[in-house]
Image (spheres, rainbow, N blue to C red):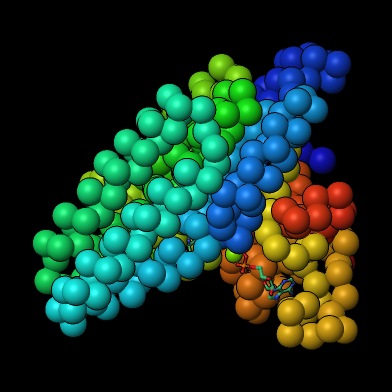
């Protein structure tokens, strides 16, 4: 077996290969839209992150937009194109109050709440002026609009973690995931991304901080925000897992794992507790929505284990996807 010494060193193995000195396992955990779909699930997410941190792991957290928000932002793009100003204003207002309400229901202590409200307001004003100044929505502008779903939610999750005494910092993935200019469906430049991750994410982890990263988005070498494709936060997690040489990438969602078929449509679907990377990749590419099609790709051939787990039933074993034959 070929051993990647750089990855091992980064993960804390001594150069002499002494396993005793291995640092904490590094887990990238991605929480999907339902898992962060309101104050209650966000509190649940914060308690899970706290648990796995206290158990001695280093974590990187990837967060989606609150359930339904990306769809509302897409709709907003249509209102812009159709010059439906009133609908646009109402939609903006709805997004603003939705986030403020979630923040409010977290019952944060005063200083945290005040600074979170400020952040939400600041981001919202960015979205508001962007949306009201556009007449058309070419893919580049639409990606900027869509990015606000994840960018508004990350400070909320970070605040929920801080309230539990977990040392976490919000991080905009447009600073670390560098992509091509294929707006709406951008692909990462892995070398450049690895460099940004080394410069920005690794020092945070070394300081004992949990980066709370926006899923779904990146930026071009010119600094324009891109999106990776709808459902792409899973891909954000596996890209980060790859460049960090993480031990595991966990996709937390609203079902127990990967099933033989969509369990919401087929009551006979079977939970698959173990899958090879190749089989999982095939299933994702064939449209099993639980994994964004390209999720497994960056991990193929690596030792990084990919798991799919249920945020609402965390003790359930989930699906383990790893490098095995068959
Ligand atoms: P998230 O917001 O957490 O990313 P998604 O809606 O993208 O969640 O994916 C989870 C959903 O994927 C499940 O609720 C389920 O209905 C659907 N799904 C489709 N195919 C499968 C499958 N083969 N196994 C599990 N879930 C599946
Ligand atoms: N928020 C984005 C979407 O709804 C990305 C994701 O949820 O993974 O498509
Ligand atoms: Mg998804």
Camera-side residue: 6 or 184? Answer: 184
Is residue 171 in view from this perspective?
A: no
Q: Nearer the viewer, residue 65 or 321?
A: 65
Q: Is residue 315 left or right of residue 200?
A: right
Q: Residue at x 16, y 73 (%)?
A: 85
**Residue at image point 15% right, 63% down:** 132
Residue 115 position within the rendered picture, expressed as x and y whole percent measured from the top left: 38, 30
- Residue 23 position, x and y percent, is 74, 20
Between residues 182 and 123, which one lies in front from this camera angle? 123
- Specify whether 43 is left or right of 79: right
Ligand 1's quadrant is bottom right
User: In the image, is residue 59 above or below residue 89?
Assistant: above
In the rendered image, residue 312, in percent from the top left (x then y), is placed at 75, 56
Quarter holding the N terminus is top right
List x then y, in percent, for residue 51: 76, 33
Q: Residue 185 falls in which quadrant of the image? A: bottom left
Specify the quadrant that holds the C terminus. bottom right
The answer to whether residue 89 shows anywhere in this view is yes
How many numbered markers are drawn? Answer: 0
| 99 relative position to 257: left or right | left
The quarter holding residue 52 reads top right
Name which residue lies at 63% across and 28% down. 164
Q: Is residue 98 above or below residue 63?
A: below
Horizontal arrangement in the rendering, residue 172 relative to residue 76 (left or right): right
């Amino acid at each position: 077996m070929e051993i990647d010494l750089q990855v091992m060193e980064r993960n804390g193995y001594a150069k002499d290969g002494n396993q005793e000195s291995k640092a904490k396992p590094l887990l990238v955990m991605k929480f999907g839209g339902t898992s962060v779909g309101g104050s209650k699930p966000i509190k649940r997410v914060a308690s899970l992150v706290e648990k796995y941190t206290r158990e001695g792991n280093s974590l990187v957290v990837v967060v989606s937009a609150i359930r339904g928000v990306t769809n509302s932002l897409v709709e907003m793009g249509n209102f812009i194109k159709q010059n439906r100003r009133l609908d646009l204003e109402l939609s903006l207002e709805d997004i603003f109050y939705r986030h403020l309400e979630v923040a409010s229901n977290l019952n944060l202590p005063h200083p945290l709440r005040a600074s979170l409200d400020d952040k939400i307001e600041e981001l919202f004003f960015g979205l508001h002026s962007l949306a009201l100044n556009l007449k058309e929505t070419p893919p580049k502008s639409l990606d900027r609009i869509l990015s606000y779903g994840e960018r508004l939610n990350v400070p909320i999750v970070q605040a929920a973690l801080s309230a539990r005494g977990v040392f976490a910092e919000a991080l905009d993935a447009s600073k670390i995931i560098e992509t091509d200019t294929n707006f709406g469906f951008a692909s990462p430049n892995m070398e450049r991304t690895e460099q940004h991750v080394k410069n920005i994410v690794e020092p945070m982890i070394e300081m004992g901080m949990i980066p709370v990263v926006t899923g779904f988005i990146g930026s071009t070498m010119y600094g324009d925000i891109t999106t990776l494709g709808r459902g792409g936060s899973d891909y954000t997690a596996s890209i980060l897992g790859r460049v960090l040489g993480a031990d595991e990438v966990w996709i937390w969602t609203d079902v127990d794992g990967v099933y033989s078929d969509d369990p919401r449509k087929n009551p006979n679907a079977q939970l698959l507790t173990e899958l090879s990377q190749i089989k999982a990749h095939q299933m994702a590419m064939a449209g099993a929505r639980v994994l964004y099609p390209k999720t497994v790709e960056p991990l193929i051939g690596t030792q990084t284990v990919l798991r799919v787990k249920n945020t609402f039933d965390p003790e359930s074993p989930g699906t383990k996807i790893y490098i095995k034959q068959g």
